[in-house]
Image (spheres, grey):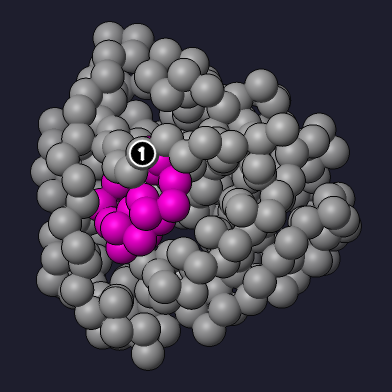
């Protein structure tokens, strides 16, 4: 068990940046290291900069570290807009251009991984390297639709229809945002249950109380599917590190890892005894992997 997971160090105090009329929260720690790019951390769905506190505490000793709350999450504005990988890609690109001032290495978990991949592939001038931690995002479908159970297909369509309705997504949001449900969900996606602290639950619950949070949640069901991972990987040019928690119940890590290798063979990958959020569950291991990889692969010429 990673004892650092028992208690999170405080996240450094942050600042706000105005983007397209919205307040975007970010934090900065550490100092610029000669010969190495900064590191930008991007959280997953429902999380925030707080989810990287254990990583910032250690990584700031070796790098200039930034973390940002994507629009719609954390302490950033819960705007009534159409959310997509393209929107967050553009947010990250503008943040790097206007605030950081130079291309960093991006590290993203889950949804943050997909947004980071979109940026690195489609705005290559804004990325010196990419670290994906149990990254989300679709691949081009290869299985014929005819293999799908027709009953399951009907149930899926009915369920989607219900959640596309404002009342349906609102009721689901109110249920899922209960602290008891948040904790229950986290206990499913973390192998080490001691990492599921009251502080972690509170960090996820708190932003759900903000004005506009239900509409952000509803956008998940209404947003068109973004560019496929395989297409993005074929556009990617920078070094890629993949970190997988093998105990992730939301995705088959080995299977997804094989898909990433298929379209981007020149990558480095590690499989860890952790769930969906290994950076928070086994932070010491992840921090050491990130540090070693950056020192080897991202040194500026």
Question: Is residue 18 placed above or below 38 in the rendered structure?
Answer: above
Q: Is residue 4 visible?
A: yes
- Residue at image location 63% in from the left, 76% down from the top: 271
Quadrant assignment, res 91: top left
Give coordinates of residue 193: x percent, y percent. Answer: 30, 85
Residue 216 or residue 254, whichever sits in front: 254
Quadrant of the rendering where the C terminus is positioned: top right
- Residue at image location 36% in from the left, 39% down from the top: 31
- Residue at image location 13% in from the left, 49% down from the top: 206
Residue 57 or residue 244, whichever sits in front: 57
Q: Secondary structure at mark 1?
A: loop
Total marks drawn? 1
Give coordinates of residue 186: x percent, y percent. Answer: 32, 72
Q: Mark 1 sits on what residue?
A: 31
Give coordinates of residue 145: x percent, y percent. Answer: 81, 56
Quadrant of the rendering where the N terminus is positioned: bottom left
In magenta stretch: residue 65: yes
Q: Is residue 118 visible?
A: no
Residue 82 or residue 11, whichever sits in front: 11
Question: Is residue 189 placed above or below 28 in the rendered structure?
Answer: below
Which residue ends up furthest to the bottom in the rendered image? 1
Q: Which residues are magenta?
A: 48-67
Mark 1 surroundings within 10 Å by alpha-carbon count, few (fewer than 14), some (14 through 19), many (20 or more): few
Give coordinates of residue 134: x percent, y percent. Answer: 56, 61
Which residue ends up furthest to the top in the rendered image? 21
Side (left or right) of 240 relative to 275: right
- Residue at image location 51% in from the left, 48% down from the top: 108
Side (left or right) of 10 relative to 173: left
Question: Is residue 300 placed above or below 279 in the rendered structure?
Answer: above
In magenta stretch: residue 5: no
């Amino acid at each position: 068990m990673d004892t650092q997971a028992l208690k999170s160090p405080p996240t450094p105090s942050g600042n706000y940046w105005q983007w397209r009329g919205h307040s975007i929260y970010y934090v900065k720690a550490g100092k610029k290291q000669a010969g190495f790019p900064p590191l930008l951390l991007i959280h997953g769905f429902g999380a925030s900069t707080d989810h990287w506190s254990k990583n910032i505490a250690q990584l700031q000793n070796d790098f200039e570290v930034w973390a940002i709350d994507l629009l719609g999450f954390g302490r950033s504005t819960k705007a009534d807009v159409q959310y997509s990988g393209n929107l967050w890609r553009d947010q990250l690109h503008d943040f790097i251009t206007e605030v950081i001032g130079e291309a960093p290495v991006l590290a993203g978990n889950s949804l943050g991984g997909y947004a980071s991949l979109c940026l690195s592939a489609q705005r290559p001038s804004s990325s010196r390297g990419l670290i994906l931690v149990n990254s989300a995002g679709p691949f081009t479908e290869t299985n014929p639709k005819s293999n799908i159970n027709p009953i399951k297909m009907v149930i899926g369509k009915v369920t989607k229809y219900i959640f596309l309705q404002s009342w349906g997504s609102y009721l689901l949001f109110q249920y899922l945002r209960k602290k008891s449900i948040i904790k229950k969900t986290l206990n499913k996606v973390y192998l080490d249950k001691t990492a599921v602290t009251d502080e972690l639950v509170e960090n996820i619950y708190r932003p759900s109380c903000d004005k506009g949070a239900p509409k952000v949640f509803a956008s998940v069901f209404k947003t068109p599917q973004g560019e496929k991972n395989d297409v993005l990987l074929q556009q990617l040019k920078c070094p890629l590190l993949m970190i997988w928690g093998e105990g992730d119940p939301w995705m088959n890590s080995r299977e997804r890892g094989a898909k990433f290798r298929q379209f981007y063979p020149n990558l480095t990958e590690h499989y860890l005894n952790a769930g969906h959020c290994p950076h928070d569950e086994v932070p010491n291991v992840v921090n050491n992997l990130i540090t070693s990889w950056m020192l080897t692969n991202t040194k500026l010429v």
